[in-house]
Image (tube, rainbow, N blue to C red):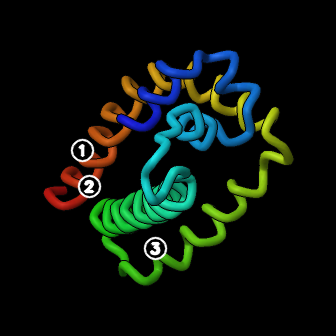
Amino acid sequence: MITYVLVVATLTVPEVKAVTWPTISFIQSFEVTGIFLERMELFLLITWILQFFLTHAIYYYFAAEGLTKIFNNSYTTNLIVLVPVVFFLAKVPKNTIEIFKMSDLLGYLFPVILIGLPIITFVIVQLKRSRRSG
């Protein structure tokens, strides 16, 4: 989030939408002369790739763990189900324009998800409790 806020605050929203790699453009705007390493893109790319990988891995773990707790099935089964779902969803956008359209759609759906997800979770928990006690 800090990276996102810094990039958008420095570059402006239209420029972030126009540039393919806004974070690299952000770092290139700060050139420090006279140091051993004047360009820091390499370190930024390494950090950025690790950030995306670790964020994906953590969310993938929590998704499988949550499905395990909700449906009382094995963790391995949930991993096997989630892999094709995640990679199919990753194949949906064909170019960066479609990614921006999807992000706009997610922005509009966020309030619905914010309100709907707790309600759906509550209903699932109540159904599980009624099955256990009944």
Nearer the observer, 76 or 101: 101
Residue type, mark 2 in image: Lys
Q: Considering only vertical position in the picture, is 120 above or below 101?
A: below
Dot 3 surroundings within 10 Å: few (below 14), some, or many (20 or more)?
A: some
Nearer the observer, 128 or 40: 40
**Camera sees residue 56:** no
Question: Where residue 89 sits: x, y (%)?
Answer: 69, 54
Q: Of marks 2 and 3, which one's residue comes earlier in the chain?
A: 3
Q: Which residue is drawn at 45% across and 59% down?
A: 36
**Occupied quadrant, residue 122:** top left
Q: Considering only vertical position in the picture, is 60 above or below 102?
A: below
Nearer the observer, 121 or 18: 18
Query: In 3D space, how far apart are the residues under numbered discs 2 and 1 (Cα atoms)?
Result: 5 Å
The numbered dot on residue 128 is 2
The numbered dot on residue 126 is 1
Question: Where residue 79 sits: x, y (%)?
Answer: 48, 76
* The residue positioned farthest toward the left in the image shown: 133
Residue type, mark 3 in image: Asn
Local secondary structure at mark 1: helix
From the image, tell me which residue sits under label 3. Answer: 78
**Occupied quadrant, residue 12:** top right
Dot 1 surroundings within 10 Å: few (below 14), some, or many (20 or more)?
A: few
Q: Considering only vertical position in the picture, is 118 above or below 47?
A: above
Q: Residue at x 43, y 66 (%)?
A: 57
Query: Which quarter shows the N terminus?
Result: top left
Q: Residue at x 77, y 57 (%)?
A: 91
